[in-house]
Image (spheres, rainbow, N blue to C red):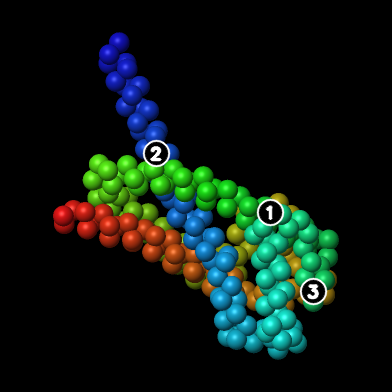
Amino acid sequence: MKFSRLMNGSNSMKWRRLGQWCAFHLFGITLSIFLVINCTFLYSWTLKWYHVLATVNMSKIQLMHNYHQLIYYLSFPWIKHLKMTDFPSSSAGLQHFADVKNLFMLNEVVLVISGVIFFFFIRELIKTKSLWQVIRPLQIAAVVPILVAVMMSISFNQFFIVFHELLFRNDDWMFDPQKDPIINALPEEFFLQCFVLVFIFIECFYLIFIWIGRKQIKK
């Protein structure tokens, strides 16, 4: 009877630890995505680097205003309808942005829930002076974003297509510039930079805790 209880307790601890590690990684990933979504300066740089203003024949102030309208719609649940001042949208375009909004909302929900679990997990490791235990798992995990980045660099266009086919069940993401001119203001290079920045943030997240773990060992 005691052996059975010990086994049940051991299994419970394993599942608990697995859940904590899942929350750790989910928090790092969703936090990185959240930060990139709100890095509006990245889009501002894109306008300069890729001559977007000349393509859409619009001032930077106008275009940034429309971009903020789009980001506010995607990021805030209380904004129910997308309306960009200078860019009309087709029904398919609006549906795609609604689908993207749902993914953004999901990201924020997972960010909050995983963040709570992450907080108590890290607090537990600090109290038990066990932060050094994250070093090896994070060293392994840190390889994954690098591998994905390498795959992406081989053919970002193909990567981008597969990414959309996995996340969306329709073809609404294939914009017609005549019906959804906003696509002219969102060059492929902008999305590439967003992906790269997400990977950089994830790597930094892992490296910070690897550094903290090593620092604890030295003490």
| Relative image position of residue 54 (x, y in whole percent) | 70, 89
Q: Earlier in the sequence, mark 3 or mark 1?
A: 1
On the image, numbered disc 3 is attached to which residue? 85
Q: Residue at x 30, y 50 (%)?
A: 134
Contact between labelled residues 2 and 1, with CB atoms less than 8 Å apart: no
Q: Is residue 197 left or right of residue 188?
A: left
Name the residue at the top extreme: 1
Which of 109/88 is in front? Answer: 109
Residue 77 numbered tag: 1
Disc 2 crowd rating (10 Å Cα; few below 14, some 14-19, many 20+) is few
Query: For the residues marked 3 and 1, what is the alpha-carbon distance in whole angstroms?
Result: 20 Å
Query: For the residues marked 2 and 3, what is the alpha-carbon distance in whole angstroms?
Result: 47 Å
On the image, numbered disc 2 is attached to which residue? 18
Disc 3 crowd rating (10 Å Cα; few below 14, some 14-19, many 20+) is few
Picture quadrant where residue 75 is located: bottom right
Q: Quadrant of the N terminus?
A: top left
Q: Is residue 140 left or right of residue 101?
A: left
Q: Determine if residue 176 is in view.
A: no
Is residue 131 shown above or below 182? above
| Relative image position of residue 149 (x, y in whole percent) | 46, 66
